Amino acid sequence: MEAISAAIAVSIAAVAASIGNGMVISKTIESIARQPELEDRLRTTMFLGVGLIEAVPIMAVVIAFILVFR
C-alpha cells in the first residue's frame, strides 16, 4: 500500500510540474512575441523557472523513496 501511495504522489507531482512548465513556456512565448527586444532576458528567466519547477517532482521521488524504504 505504501508503494501505491508513493507512486500516486510522484505521478501527481509530475503532472503538476508538466502543467506548470507548459504555462511558463507559453507565457514566455507570448512575452517574446510582444517584446522581441527582451528575448534573451526572457529566455534566461524561463530556463530558471523551468529548472525550479522540475525540482518539485525530483523532491517528490526522493520523499517517496524515503517513505517506501524506511
Image (cartoon, grey):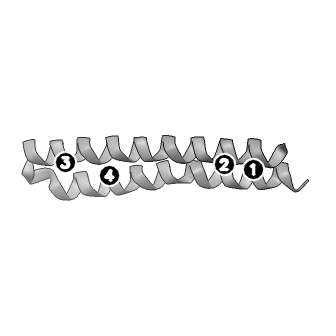
Q: Position of residue 31 (x, y in %)?
A: 17, 43
Q: Where is the N terminus found, in terms of image quarters?
A: top right
The disc placed on residue 64 is 1
Query: Mark 3 or mark 4, which has the lower sequence index?
Result: 3
Amino acid type shown at disc 1? Ala
Read off the residue under disc 3. 29
Question: Helix, strand, or loop for circle 3?
Answer: helix
Q: How far apart are the alpha carbons under marks 1 and 4? A: 28 Å
Q: How far apart are the alpha carbons under marks 2 and 4? A: 22 Å
Q: How far apart are the alpha carbons under marks 3 and 4? A: 10 Å
Query: Which picture quadrant has residue 22?
Result: top left
Which residue appears farthest toward the right when viewing the image?
70
Q: How far apart are the alpha carbons under marks 1 and 2? A: 6 Å
Q: From the viewer's perspective, tell me whether residue 20 is left or right of residue 32.
A: right
Read off the residue under disc 4. 46
Q: From the viewer's perspective, tell me whether residue 27 is left or right of residue 21.
A: left
The disc placed on residue 60 is 2
- Point 61% across, 55% down: residue: 58
Q: From the viewer's perspective, tell me whether residue 17 is left or right of residue 47.
A: right
Q: Are marks 1 and 2 in contact (CB under 8 Å)?
A: yes
The disc placed on residue 48 is none
Q: Are marks 2 and 3 in contact (CB under 8 Å)?
A: no
Dot 3: within a 10 Å radius of its alpha carbon, few (fewer than 14), some, or many (20 or more) residues? some
